[in-house]
């Protein structure tokens, strides 16, 4: 089975080291409401991870109503008076959701329905994907072979690197012994 050290999937942190330090300082100073308000934009930042050499992004915090104009669109600020955003965060401290704001630039077109969508931590979803990949993956066992006794003059040779330095002994194809090398 694969272990955590196998690093099959790499989840990139959405925060830099300086941002983590700032958040740690603010966590003790600010009230929970102030802290949540200050760092709410991270909710709309996609999480990134690399799997099999391919970069993937996850963004669950958007409108999921297929009849809404904002369905699947990322958070943005409009360039109008007051700079309103596409979504706003509503709900109690235990259960937050995203609500679609009216479109201030809309002339005609599809309606914005004021939909509510539950929020998820994109980074936590990426961490869960990493965990599932690890428990559902099998890694080849790396065997450590010892072909020579300590102090052997041909210590650097192995059957994988220089096979003519070894010969078979007996009838079994699996038995390999050291050949005597000229000094």
Image: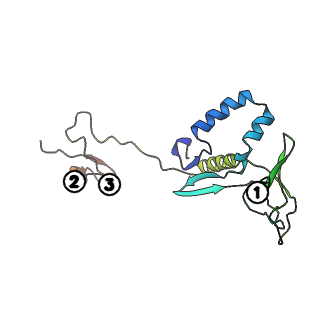
Q: Nearer the viewer, residue 107 or 98?
A: 107
| 1 or 2: mark nearer the eye | 1
Q: Image point 79% across, 55% down: which residue? A: 81
Relative height, residue 144 to residue 67 (above, below): above
**In percent of the image, x 70 and y 31: which residue is there?**
26
Which residue is denoted by mark 1 in the rendering? 62
Residue 13: give its label.
none
Q: Which mark is residue 173?
A: 3
Q: Earlier in the sequence, mark 1 or mark 3?
A: 1
* Crowding near the residue tagged with mark 1, few <14, some 14–19, many ≥20 C-alpha atoms within 10 Å: many
Left or right: residue 135 versus residue 61 is left
Marks 2 and 3, the one that precedes in the sequence: 2
Residue beneath label 2, please?
Answer: 164
Q: Residue furthest top?
A: 28
- Front residue of this view, candidates 57 and 101: 101
- Indicate the secondary structure of the residue bearing disc 3: loop
Do tag 1 and tag 2 residues touch (Cβ < 8 Å)?
no
Q: Quadrant of residue 76?
A: bottom right
Using residue 3 as the reference point, say whether residue 32 is left or right of it: right
Q: Is residue 134 left or right of residue 179?
A: right
Quadrant containing the C terminus in the rendered view: top left
């Amino acid at each position: 089975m694969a272990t955590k050290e196998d690093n099959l999937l790499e989840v990139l942190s959405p925060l830099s080291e300086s941002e983590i330090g700032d958040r740690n300082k603010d966590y003790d100073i600010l009230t929970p409401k102030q802290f949540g308000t200050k760092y709410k934009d991270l909710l709309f930042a996609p999480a990134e991870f690399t799997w099999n050499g391919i970069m993937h992004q996850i963004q669950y915090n958007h409108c999921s109503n297929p009849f809404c104009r904002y369905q699947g669109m990322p958070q943005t600020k409009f360039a109008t008076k007051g700079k309103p955003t596409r979504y706003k965060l509503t709900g109690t401290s235990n259960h937050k959701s995203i609500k679609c704001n009216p479109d201030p630039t809309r002339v005609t077109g599809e309606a914005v329905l004021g939909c509510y969508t539950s929020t998820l931590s994109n980074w936590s979803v990426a961490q869960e994907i990493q965990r599932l990949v690890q428990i559902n993956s099998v890694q080849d066992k790396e065997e450590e072979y010892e072909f020579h006794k300590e102090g052997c003059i041909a210590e650097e040779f192995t059957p994988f690197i220089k096979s003519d330095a070894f010969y078979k002994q007996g009838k079994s194809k699996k038995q390999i012994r050291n050949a005597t090398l000229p000094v």
